Amino acid sequence: MIIAFELIKKIADGKFHSGQALAQELKINRAHIWRAIAYLKSLKLEIYSVKGKGYKLASPIELLNEAHILENLSQKTATALNLLQVLSVTHSTNDYVKEHKLRSLPEKTAVVAEAQTQGRGRAGRTWFSPFGANIYLSLFWKLKQNLSGLSLVVGLAIAKSLEELGVTVKVKWPNDIYYENKKMVGILIESEFKPGADTQNIFIGMGLNVNLQGCAFGSSEADLELKNTITDLTSVLGVTPSRNLFIAVVLNNLVEFLEKFESHGFAYFLPMWEKYDYLMGKLISVIKPIASQNLVGHAKGVSQRGELLLDDQGVLKAICVGDIKVRENLR
Ligand code: BTN
């Protein structure tokens, strides 16, 4: 749908554009315009069509721009990164990187997309990925085998990036980022283990809500529930920050934190974790993956290896995996 991406450049300013003017500028007929609009709407972009006025986005969009991202990278990140790819629509940036690695994407590649049609969250969940609204980023990296605490370190790098923007967030173990009890960022880290190799392929995926105002949420119960439990940068800041600039800020911090993690491990980040720990002191349930019993207790921080520490009736347990549900706030 190349036409749709030409059309979005014309209407990205959030102003009305008549179908006729768009058809003339793009040298296509009105039916093609209509189809391109329908395609963009299918990517959850809210577009108003008003008779006599034309088409208008519910909220203006700053489209992704490779040059703009590159010019905001630090010297260190620009040197470290081998490739930055900006995609319009893909199924999932994590899957894209996995499928194209080695064939065309070298290690230390970052991929961002305007929309994902099959954005994936943790535990098989889907990730809401409307066009132009948010940041969908994947980073392909190779790390030495000991990865304990990596997901927490990635969460901290993003939390620090948000703080640089003036947004104070907390990180919910292992790495969901919350602003006042609502989720703003989700992180999905996947790895490929090759027996005998001294490094592993790591795919770090980040979905960060930037501006949900211009998105078409569905009306199902699940969509309403989603809408009530997430937040975005625009609601918090009162303005929509530049996605291009923020992608660069996140990459700068990720590169720095990953390099530190490689040389010092998670223990180096423990004091920082204490500052951002969302769960500390809360009564929580740990929903264990398959066949083992769920646990309930108070969160007591994390270990030197990044395991969640849970006070289960006086016994301190170290948790490596599990989904966390908060049952009550601080006692
Ligand atoms: C979660 O909180 O469940 C994790 C969400 C991770 C979403 C990001 S968006 C970029 C990357 N591509 C995906 O398909 N998922 C991750």
Image: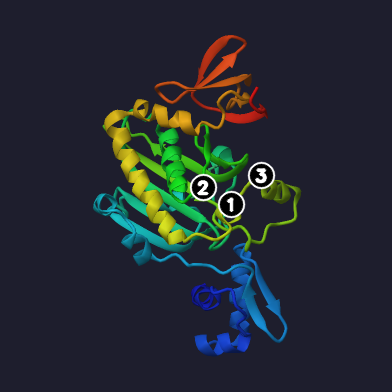
Q: Which residue is mark 2?
A: 167
Which amino acid lies under the numbered mark 2 shown in the image of this protein?
A: Val
Q: Give the residue displayed 42% in from the left and 32% down from the top.
A: 272
Using the image, tell me which numbered label, if any, was put on residue 290. Answer: none
Q: Which residue is mark 3?
A: 229
Please tell me whether mark 1 sits on a helix, a strand or a loop: helix
Q: Position of residue 208 (x, y in %)?
A: 52, 50
Q: Give the residue displayed 71% in from the left and 87% down from the top.
A: 52
Which amino acid lies under the numbered mark 1 shown in the image of this protein?
A: Val
Q: Do the CB atoms of the residues marked 2 and 1 lie less than 8 Å apart?
A: yes
In the depicted structure, whether residue 13 falls above or below residue 223: below
Nearer to me, 140 or 58? 58
Q: Position of residue 5 (x, y in %)?
A: 50, 73
Please tell me whether mark 3 sits on a helix, a strand or a loop: helix
In the depicted structure, whether residue 117 falls above or below residue 20: above
Query: Marks 2 and 1, Cα distance to the nearest angstrom?
Result: 8 Å
- Can the viewer see residue 196? no
Q: Give the residue displayed 41% in from the left and 41% down from the top.
A: 157
Q: Point out the frontmost of discs 2 and 3.
A: 2
Please tell me whether mark 2 sits on a helix, a strand or a loop: loop
Which amino acid lies under the numbered mark 3 shown in the image of this protein?
A: Thr
Q: Which residue is mark 1?
A: 236
Q: Point out the frontmost of discs 3 and 1.
A: 1
In the depicted structure, whether residue 175 falls above or below residue 94: above
Q: Position of residue 259 (x, y in %)?
A: 29, 39
Q: Label 3 CB, ligand 1: below 8 Å? A: no
Q: Earlier in the sequence, mark 2 or mark 1?
A: 2
Query: Is residue 79 toward the left or the right of residue 227 in the image?
Result: left
Number of residues whose C-alpha sits closer than 10 Å to that of mark 2, classed few (under 14), some (14–19) or many (20 or more): some
Q: Position of residue 282 (x, y in %)?
A: 61, 25
